[in-house]
Image: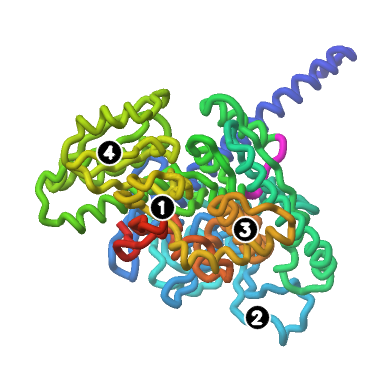
Amino acid sequence: MISFLSKSGLHSSKALMVAVFSLYCGATIAVDAQTQDIGKQIYLTGHTSSGEAIQAIVGGNAPVNGDQFSCVSCHRRSRLGSSEGGKQVPPLTATALFKPAQMSVTRGVLPKAFKHSGSTRIPYTEESLAKAIREGVDPSGRKLDPLMPRYALDADAIAALTAYLETDPSSNPGVDEASLHFATVITEGVDPVKRKAMLDILAGYFQDKNADTRHNTKRAKFSAYKMYQVYRKWELHVWELKGDESTWPTQLEDYYRSQPVLAMVGGLSASGWQPIHQFCEQFEVACLFPNTDVPVISESDFYTTYFSKGLTLEAETLASHLKNINSKAKNLRIIQVYRGNGQNAVPAKALREALQKTDSFNLQDIAIADSQPLTPKFWDDQMKKLGNGILVLWLNKEDLENLNKLPSGITTVYGSANLIDGQIQKLSDTTKANLYLIYPWELPDTKEPRLMRVKSWLKSKQIPFVDEHLQANTFFSVQILGEVITHLLDNFSSAYIVERVEGMLGTLSSRSIYPHLSLGAGQRFASKGSYIVKVSHDGHLVPVEDWIIP
């Protein structure tokens, strides 16, 4: 049967075919994305789509499951592999698996004699990859290391995992042929002096970096090594968040859709960091060392690295100190005073949780409304009620200025050096005489050499030195970003940036204002402890214990 269509009928038929084709393509893309998501779940968690832990054999005869040995635990989230105890764990990128393997960081320019030697193998297919996963045999017939588990995956799970491994983790929308795009986040309400102090450092460092890059991009054309492929112009995007925190996720998504970024660096918030942290997890954007006293504490989140746990670390340090000096005490009374809302409530909660497991302390909370002025009368009234015990103050310097006397029953007061913000000298002599501080940085007498580099750099840029901790931390964070980016080769992966920070942090020549900074695999808080210091009669800070790691 022959059907003749009018012109209008022909157009309708074409429209119908286009619609059907579009629906088919859309459905195919959706199925592919769903399959990749299942494969990603298998890779990251060691669990199937039904939530069951995958079963495996390691070392020839030892049964294990996905909770103990998932792909990510060895091959890392970047899928670029790792090394441990002399064992090299190979990458699982699409290029590494599905193209011929060759151990070389050159681009084929140098003679063979100058190339890194190493074995080669033919590319994987889905079938040969299944055999490697289940039986530990590569496409060339060679046995894989017995330490790699042999997983019992069915055909659907193999197909899903293969679909995920075929994606390119090094393809990042924050990178184009000419530029690497980075962002820093500043929230409404930040002190303008602090805002300018941080942004001036970032702008100055980016300017220096781009001045060097102009020469390095020329050098890359003549180099056989991939490390020079990373050189591009650095672009800094300032993402300013306004209004209530509940609106921040939408604002961040709008910024990101307008211009994706490879990573965030630094950043400054007048309140919390939770919405920004969650954004980085959702969009898989590395966020390096934001300036916040209330970081998000999570055992599983990956993409944000912090200098420390902030006020939570201070509270945990204080708890360890109190246990050390009162190991034989029973029901020792501790009164902690704090603003009931906002960041001061964070260390109060952490101290409560740290002490509740022991019967040595009787903890009493006094939560103050944010609007409550802490006048001399307020303190006089509180002192009459407090009685004997240790006083812990999670308060700012403005709140302590009117604390001029203590009742006879309280001779020891603990406070946060972070919250007092370097204004110790402005406190009354009476307050200082009884005050101990939780101090999370290098001690002042030994901190100064650590500040020489940043002070010299700031002077060269004619940037005033107005905030020791903020400016030192911002300078350090952007320096480590520069070091890490140089070592990416052509792997523009936010996950790999975080992994390189883990590996490089403890070996950098750059010095921070913290005594010790290090990150192991999966760790996200670089400084692990604090000092407890006494304010001496001449205003110096004297440690009463060695560095405490709670």
Residue to which mark 4 is pinned = 336
Residue to which mark 2 is pinned = 116
From the image, give the main secondary structure of the stretch colored magenta.
loop
Label 2 vs 1, first from the N-terminus: 2
Q: Residues within 10 Å of mark 3 (few under 14, many from 20)?
A: many
**Is 297 above or below relative to 21?**
below
Part of the protein shown in magenta: 258-263
Look at discs 2 and 4 and give the one toward the viewer.
4
Residue 183 versus residue 122: which sits nearer the camera?
183
Give the residue at x 44% y 54%.
525
Amino acid type for the residue under numbered disc 4: Gln
Name the element at disc 4: strand
Name the element at disc 1: loop
Residue to which mark 1 is pinned = 153
Quarter holding residue 120: bottom right
The Cα atoms of the two marked residues, 2 and 4, are separated by 62 Å
Residue to which mark 3 is pinned = 481
Give the residue at x 48% y 43%.
38
Q: Which mark is residue 11?
A: none
Amino acid type for the residue under numbered disc 2: His
The Cα atoms of the two marked residues, 3 and 2, are separated by 28 Å
Position of 537 compared to 456: left or right?
A: left
